[in-house]
Amino acid sequence: MNITRRVFLKTTATGIALATTKSWAGKLPSPAIERRDLFPQGVASGDPTSDSVILWTRRPPIKGKSANRLVVEIATDPEFNQLLAGGTAKISSDADWTCRFLATGLDHNREYWYRFVDEQGFASRVGRTLTAPSDDSDTPVRFTFVSCQSPNESALNAYRRMIFEDEARPENQRLNFVLHLGDFIYEVTWYAEDNPNGNRGRRIKNLYKFPQGRKIGNFHLPVSLEDYRTLYRAYLEDPDLQDARARWPFVCVWDNHEFAWAGYQSQYVAGSAFNAPAQNQKVFANQAWWEFIPARVQQPGNPKLDQFKAPAVVDTPIEPFNEDGLGEEPNNLKAINSLKIQRVLRWGKNVDLLLTDNWSFRSPDMSSDDFYAPEYPRVTPQIPFEIMNYGRHYNGDKPPDTIRFNGKDLPNPTKDVHAQTFLGREQRRWFLEQLGASTARWKIWGHSFGTMELRSDYRNLPGELGSKWPKDAGYAVIDNRFLRDKDEIFDFVRDQKITGFAVVAGDRHAFHAGLASKALPPKNYEPLGVEFITGSISQQTLFEVLEVTMAQDHPMRVLHLIDKNDGTVIPSMNITALHGVRSTLKLKETGDMEQARAVRNPDVAPHLSFLDQGGHGYAFVTATPDQLSVEFVCIPRPLERSERPDGGPLVYRVVHRTRLWKAGETPKLEQEILEGDPRYSI
């Protein structure tokens, strides 16, 4: 693709009606009394550029008294001795009393302080924000990426640790921003009275109740705009999240739980419990996200975004699907396009951050009920999975009529079905255009769930475990998704000789580090970039879930968990995916990781350097002209809030570094353990 820099930059511009008034420079600040109780969700900033940033707060009516106008004050010091800029903004119930204000005309790579003051002279807490470096700057870029948080059944101690460490750093080494990769809220909600024993070992706090809601079994789902707003209001009263948003600008995308647990497009799916078209609910979810997340996002027909304009939609089945899996029913198209979050943000010469929406345009899940091995939980047979994931595009658009599985030839249910996609055709084309046009040294894809494949060689299991992995199944796939999208993107990176390609992701509630590739052996293994996935801020990991739910006498428990004599449990699921089943069984026999690694299968995961399916925390990125480093900061299971200023102890700190490679070279990762002992993750 021949794409100019001018075209690339055009896509990043978004206006907001409420913006800085130049005449405010040099004014004295308003006489104000800080009243955090009147601004219960605190303050925030988002999506900084080199000369602007979006500022945010919420000032709801308190005891029947409301504010209709807020003064926004911006200064270069937290004492507000003299204003640098400011303006006024109207607020109302139409946007749930939230305020979005675009601070413009700022200097690049600069720290600013801001606050909001109502008509009575009551002020919000003071917020701190930062602008990006100028486009020609070589300044190192530092940010953390996070995902998956719920204060209703856990604690957000990772933010406390993040703040504590940032305050201790020299000023020139502090974070520029926080990248939140989704599941900012969890719309699936358990109430304490329905679950007196908690949720899989977690205490439920009942921080909120849906005004309307829908009860399914022992959990509740949102239905209305007010239900979604209730979630954001409650989450943003968490002190650690609120402090983090007041300290750094956040850059956000959504994952699944901002709308629907297992949904796609405007279809609401909650596992097997509920499945229905939900165009109104998709619009409600988008509007609530827009109201509470300060971001440079676009709404068709509303370029200024001074107010979210909800399209009128009717809940209607979203068929028919076109050849790319997009439901062409008009209400579906209106709902999923009511807010577009894909965008590109630039930090000097070093980083272009490309952000995609991985749920609004994804195709429906395929049916694979006939192709699973029930004796082996949590895995999918590779060969049937790949055939069905590609649909009618498998084998060069020549899919088989039947799929051989477990000794039988079964009808191929996806022979005439579109390939699975998460980006959709238009967004995939947009992403490739932006990637091809980027001149930054590091092209970092903010991907909500990542491209990395996890698998294991179950065909090497001994017969004494009680059953044999089907011979015609290939590998046991633990996690892999959307193969045709991956093909197109990695082929583009290869053909265009793109260097500095990196993926950062969340969603999986696990730390991963490795090389990004289109395929693994025995197919052509060709690393074209690097990829890092962060553990969750607080949500349950697979390790924690299986500790609670998997029977100790399950024949395959050893592939996931190894019970020690002292009552502790080894997360053998990491070894199974990193090194293969022989390593896992050797670890069970000897308890020694060196002996376990000595019998590893090098073809299982040649791309993986690190895997922890039980870790919580965040990842800290530093991008310089010639190196990208990503440090995993892992904390203990955050069941309750830590009162320590550092957020509690650390489990480990591990850093991965890669040098900027040249076209035609293979990227390489170096690993260093800085603190702790992640022996079962390497």
Image: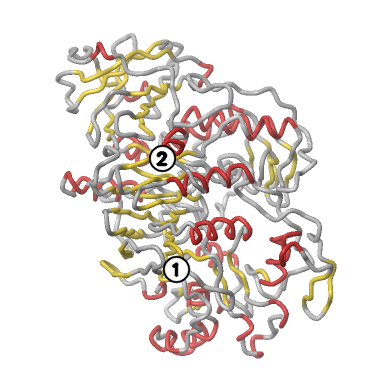
Q: Is residue 542 left or right of residue 361?
A: left
Q: Residues within 10 Å of mark 2 (few under 14, many from 20)?
A: few
| Residue 266 in view here | yes
| Residue 192 in view here | no
* Residue 652 figure quarter: bottom left
Amino acid at dot 1: Leu
The quadrant of the rendering that contains the C terminus is bottom left
Q: Is residue 519 above or below residue 110?
A: below
Upstream in sequence: badge 2 or badge 1 = 2
Say which residue label 1 marks. 611
Q: Say the numbered circle drawn on residue 582.
A: none
Say which residue label 2 marks. 5
Residues 205 and 344: in front is 344
Q: CA distance from mark 2 to mark 1?
A: 37 Å
Measured from the top left, where is residue 629 in percent x and y? 31, 59
Question: In percent of the image, x 47 and y 34: which residue is there?
Answer: 11
Q: Are marks 2 and 1 in contact (CB under 8 Å)?
A: no
Q: Secondary structure at mark 1?
A: strand
Question: In percent of the image, x 55 and y 74: which residue is there?
Answer: 524
Q: Is residue 621 above or below residue 406?
A: above
Residues 497 and 111: in front is 497
Q: Is residue 219 above or below residue 98?
A: below
Viewer-side label of 2, 1: 2
